[in-house]
Image: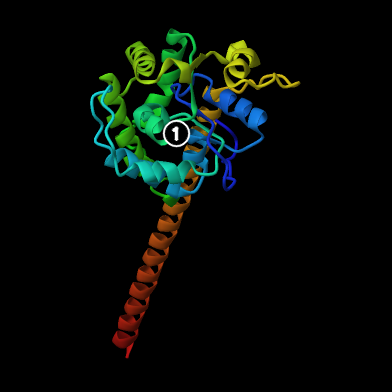
């Protein structure tokens, strides 16, 4: 996950789709593709969390519109134009929810290479525990309420969990079952000549060989998906809590002012009564 969203460049053909699960090196893959093609890469996690609110609301609409079928039966969907519009102008796209829309992406981009990033399954399962917990806290909507731009996160998470449940038979917490089911699904759905299973620890070699490109004279980027996601979540929650402090402080000040004015009014009335008695 990057530090800032990418901006599309008109007429840029989409060459690569990263369909590995989140926290399998999708940020490193995105950075590598940016170097190889010198073009903007759509890392969904970054675009959704740090981009305009319309990114989150449009993906929510996409996932709500697609009648998610059994994993092997792609169906035409009115959501396809929405997906195309979201990815238009990018040379590549990676991360969720794209990794759960493989049949739709195959239909939209018949010439693109599909790269499924992989890692040790047990390490992946451990890395997802914190993310699943943060995304499904019962009071998430209440915590995020002061941040208007983050309020669409709750419905987005709900439709994303619906996607996971339909594809892998579980939502949260995600387990090794999801990892294995996703890899098996990808191998079944994507034609072998258009699929690369890629461990970012292997560096440029396998990726450049599959793309038919020369290895760049720079080190392969090593970005930590977990740290980036955790940083965004932590920053967002701190902002929300600080906004709540401001809201409550403002409410407390208003209540105090109301009490003071009421006390002052009552005091003036008592003073007037005492004055009348003396007269």
Q: Is residue 179 left or right of residue 12?
A: left
Q: x and y percent of residue 102 in the render? A: 38, 27
* On screen, residue 99 above or below 267: above
Circle 1 sits in a helix, a strand or a loop, which is it?
loop
Q: Residue extending furthest right? A: 217
Number of labels in the image equals 1
Residue in front for this viewpoint, 45 or 18: 18
- Residue receiving disc 1: 109
Q: Quadrant of the N terminus?
A: top right
- Residue drawn where x is 38% and y is 45% of the image: 81
Horizontal arrangement in the rendering, residue 269 relative to residue 233 (left or right): left
Q: Quadrant of residue 129?
A: top left
Q: Is residue 61 above or below residue 132?
A: below
33 vs 134, left or right, is right
> How packed is label 1: few (under 14 Cα within 10 Å), some, or many (20 or more)?
some
Q: Is residue 144 visible?
A: no
Query: Residue at the location (34% across, 31% down)?
Result: 137
User: Where residue 108 sits in the image (x, y, percent)?
Assistant: 41, 36
Which quadrant is home to the C terminus? Answer: bottom left
Picture coordinates of residue 255, whole percent (x, y): 38, 60
Residue nearest the observer in this picture, 227 or 93: 93
Residue 264: percent from left, percent from top: 39, 72
């Amino acid at each position: 996950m990057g530090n800032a969203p990418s901006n599309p460049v008109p007429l840029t053909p989409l060459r690569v789709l990263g369909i590995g699960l989140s926290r399998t090196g999708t940020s490193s893959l995105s950075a590598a593709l940016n170097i190889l093609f010198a073009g903007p890469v759509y890392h969904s996690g970054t675009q959704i969390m740090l981009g305009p609110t319309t990114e989150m609301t449009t993906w929510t609409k996409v996932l709500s519109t697609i009648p998610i079928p059994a994993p092997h039966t792609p169906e035409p969907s009115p959501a396809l134009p929405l997906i195309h519009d979201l990815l238009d102008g990018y040379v590549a796209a990676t991360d969720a929810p794209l990794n759960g829309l493989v049949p739709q992406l195959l239909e939209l981009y018949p010439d693109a290479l599909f790269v499924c990033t992989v890692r040790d399954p047990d390490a992946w399962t451990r890395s997802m525990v914190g993310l699943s917990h943060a995304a499904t806290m019962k009071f998430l909507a209440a915590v995020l309420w002061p941040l208007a731009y983050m309020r669409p996160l709750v419905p987005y998470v709900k439709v994303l969990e619906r996607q996971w449940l339909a594809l892998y038979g579980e939502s949260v917490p995600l387990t090794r079952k999801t990892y294995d089911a996703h890899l098996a699904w990808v191998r079944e759905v994507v034609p072998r000549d258009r699929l690369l299973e890629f461990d970012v620890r292997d560096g440029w070699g396998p990726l450049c060989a599959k793309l038919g490109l020369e290895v760049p004279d720079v080190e392969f980027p090593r970005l930590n998906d977990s740290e980036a996601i955790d940083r965004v979540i932590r920053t967002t929650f701190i902002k929300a809590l600080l906004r709540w402090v401001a809201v409550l402080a403002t409410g407390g000040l208003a209540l105090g002012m109301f009490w003071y004015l009421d006390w002052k009014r009552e005091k003036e009335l008592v003073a007037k009564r005492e004055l009348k008695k003396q007269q």
